[in-house]
Each structure stands twice: as structure tokens, then as C-alpha cells.
Image (spheres, rainbow, N blue to C red):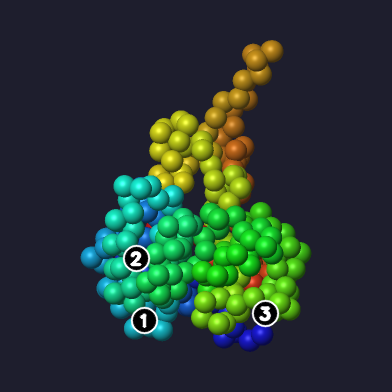
Amino acid sequence: MTRSDFELLAPAGNFESLTASIQGGANGIYFGVDQLNMLAKSTNNFSINDLPEVVKRCHQHQVKAYLALNTIVYDHEITLMHRLVDAAKDAQVDAIIASDQSVLLYASEKKVPIHVSTQLNVSNLETLRFYSQYAETIVLARELSLQQIAYLTKKIKEENITAPSGNLVRIEIFIHGALCMAISGKCYMSLHEYNASANRGACQQTCRRSYTVTDNETGYQLEIDNEYIMSPKDLATYFFFDEIINAGATVFKIEGRARS
């Protein structure tokens, strides 16, 4: 493979970070607008009215624009979801990042390319085959090993598993940034403590706070501050990036829409 086979995907939570990601050399930008994205309430988001301008700025620099529409969707939000997908199509977004089947179905109906979110926890070949009916790119579950990723990318080529476009399905993985302790980000701590669901874009980062742990038998207390007692350290793969490339992934995502 050559450099042109790979795509570096960077986050943007506002126009300033959008500009920084473009200037930094990203091949694609992912972002959210208004509601129904995983950082809807924990970061600044673009508005639906910003959508054409975001896509325009990306395309002016030959950078792809991907709209994150990747939360759980409830019945009362179907109309809003339709409006966001329609707006994405009108703005010529390059793909929608989706995790709810209602989004997969409607975006497919509207002929908007789809990337399957890590929230769908794609962990095996059968699941990958299923979602290839809808998706150009599949973001694998974050828990997979390099060996498991290599197996899936090998099978895609051997079995000619194609996306709706007719091209081979692309595999995307996270290479840098925060990691959730829960499987593929399905955490309920924030919902339990603050009635703010991480699966609805409202994570309060409960796992990253300072805690005092008490031994109930002895009363001994241990203060734990910023040692990631309930959260893994941030991901940094630059020192084994050659192994990631050898595993066959071609889209590399940097986490961080909530970062400056």
C-alpha cells in the first residue's frame, strides 16, 4: 500500500479546530451538528446551519467531511434524524457516521454514504458482513487486538466483501485520544450518577474524577487522584503505528471533538 491508500481522520468541535485539523494535514474531518451525536452535550457543536460551510471549507482543501450522527435515536427524534440526514445530503457530506439502525436505513434510502460507528461493536466477520450491506467504512470495536484486525482485513480481501459503492469495505480504528472503559463506549456511569447518558452524547466523564476509596472492614481510606482508577490512560499508538498499518486498517481516527 502507498500513502494515498490511507486516511487520517481528525476531529472538529468548532471552526477553529476545523481549521487546525485541515492545516495539520488531515485527510478527513468528523464533526457533529446540534443533537444526536455522541458529544452533543459535552462539547460545542456546529449547528445545522453551519453544515454547508463546514463541508465547503473541507472540500476547498480536498478534505472529506463526515457527519457524526451516532447516538441512540428514540421515536420522537425520527423526524429530527431525517432532517439531519437530508441536510447532510444537501450539503454533500462525504458520509454519515451512524450507530442506530434507523439512521442506517434512512441514509441508505437517501443514498448518503455511511460509516458504521464503533458504538455498534463490530467484533467478528459475520457482523462485518452484515454491516457491509450499508457501510463504506466500518469502525471496529476498540477492544480488538491487532491480530483480530488483521484477520478481518484479510477476510475482506479474500472474500471480496464490498460496500454499497462496490469498493472493498474499509476498516477504521482509533489511533490516538481518550478511551472509554466500557465495551465500545457503552457506559452507564454518567447516567447512573447524573442522569446524563453517555450513549446520548451527555457523558459527564465520571470515570475521570478524583475518588477516595474506603476499605469497609478497616476504615482505611486511599485517595486516588488522576490515576485513571476507573478509566484507561489515553491511547497513543505512534510507537507501533507500523504494526497497525501491517494489520490492514486504512482509516486512522484521532479522538477529541471535545478538545480545544
Residue type at numbered disc 1: His
Residue named by callout 2? 85
Marks 3 & 2, CB-CB < 8 Å contact: no
For the residues labelled 2 and 1, say whether their Cβ atoms are less than 8 Å apart.
no
Residue 220 rendering spot, x and y as whole percentages: 65, 17
Distance between the Cα atoms at labels 1 and 3?
30 Å
Tell me the quadrant of the picture where the C terminus can be found. Answer: bottom left
Which structural element holds mark 1? helix
Mark 3 and mark 2: span between their CA atoms? 29 Å
Q: Kindly identify the amino acid type of the residue bearing the numbered disc 2.
A: Val
Q: Which residue carries the number 3 mark?
A: 160
SS for dot 2: helix
Query: Sequence order check: which comes first, mark 2 or mark 1?
Result: 1
Local crowd at mark 1 within 10 Å, few (<14), some, or many (≥20)?
some
Q: Which badge, 3 or 2, comes first in the chain's sequence?
A: 2
Residue picked out by circle 1: 59
Residue 147, given in percent of the width and then of the height, sits at 76, 64
Q: Residues within 10 Å of mark 3 (few under 14, many from 20)?
A: few
Instruction: In this rendered view, identify the residue nearer to me: 109 or 40.
Output: 109
Which residue is found at the position 61% from the left and 48% from the top?
Answer: 183
Foreground of the two, 98 or 150 = 98
